[in-house]
Image (spheres, rainbow, N blue to C red):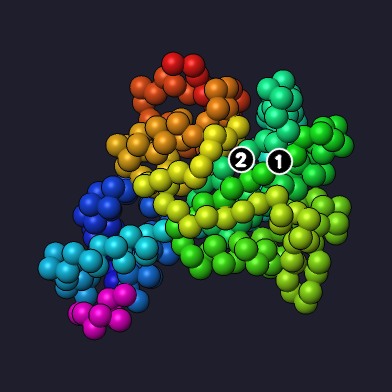
Amino acid sequence: MKDAKCIQFLQWALPRLRMRWPGFRKVRRQVCKRINRRISELRLNDVESYREYLQVHPDEWIYLDSLCRISISRFYRDKGVFDCIGDKVLPALAQLTANSGNNTIKCWSAGSASGEEAYTIALVWQFVLSLDYPDIGIHITGTEVDNNLLGRAERACYLQSSVKDLPEKWLSQAFNRTGKQYCLYPEFREKVNFISQDIRLAAPDGPFHIVLCRNLAFTYFDISLQKEVLGRIFDSLLNEGILVIGIHELLPGGITYFRPWISNMGIYRKAFV
């Protein structure tokens, strides 16, 4: 399928999935390859035939939705964001937690893919903050709709390309290297649990002190769906809780119930309403 044909198809199909074409522009070739494979599996002639197939087989839209999932993840992705979380965000939340008489910071990693983001938070807490807050712990819930990715997250074994951005000390102390794989030690894994869940439909049991929803809803979803997701996140956060989105993402216009806290890092505080 030629690129122009694929673009035309995606511009037609994505709005019907409540997604937005601009978010897919740079990753379209990955999606187009998947659609090509699907066309071959169905023994259809071309993308026009697939479009006709979708119109008479409504269940195929569910399959197409799965082909449009983008999961680009690695440990410590966007180093400045995690440095900021370690230096400013988690200390503020630790103090908030202590002042409220609790002893656990609760974090939600939405669209957690293979677990790299959720486990990075666990590593930041352990290596940067745990000694300063010996009476405070952290628990991270990762949600992901793709069960294959969830299986990889629960195994917690990664190739070097996934861990290359981690400090060498963290890598040597937190992972057991076996051949080409780096497997996270149990004491770090036990801080995280994973749930099969679609953020478009539901949220895990909260409330949470911090939610990370990076490079997902505010890149790929259409504006109305973004607002639905944002409302779900708002309801899941404690007052003065923190939302972290991608550094190149923006919240939908007209949103007043989150206020920028560290704008260049995509970090917001929940506002009182």
Judge by depth and name the residue closer to the eye, 157 or 179.
157
Q: Quadrant of residue 202?
A: top left
Q: Is residue 102 left or right of residue 17?
A: right
Point out which mark residue 171 bears: none
Q: Is residue 84 visible?
A: no
Dot 2: few (<14), some (14–19), or many (≥20) neighbours within 10 Å?
Answer: many
Dot 1: few (<14), some (14–19), or many (≥20) neighbours within 10 Å?
Answer: some
Q: Is residue 226 left or right of residue 181?
A: left
Q: Identify the residue under disc 2.
A: 107
Q: Secondary structure at mark 1?
A: strand
Please give the name of the residue rendered at 59% of the width and 48% of the height, measured from the top-left corner.
Answer: 141
Q: Is residue 48 left or right of residue 210?
A: left
- How far across and down, in percent of the image, does residue 37 sit? 35, 76
Query: If the image is split into quadrants, where does the N terminus sit?
Result: bottom left
Tag 2: residue type? Cys
Please give the name of the residue rendered at 29% of the width and 63% of the height, measured from the top-left corner.
Answer: 62
Magenta-drawn segment: 38-45
State yes or no: discs 2 and 1 in contact (Cβ < 8 Å): yes
- How far across and down, in percent of the image, does residue 79 sit? 69, 43
Q: Quadrant of residue 97?
A: top right
Residue 54 sits above or below residue 44 on the image: above
Please give the name of the residue rendered at 31% of the width and 66% of the height, measured from the top-left corner.
Answer: 63
Residue 220 sits above or below residue 146 on the image: above
Q: Residue furthest top?
A: 273
Q: Identify the residue under disc 1.
A: 138
Residue 268 sits above or below residue 47 on the image: above
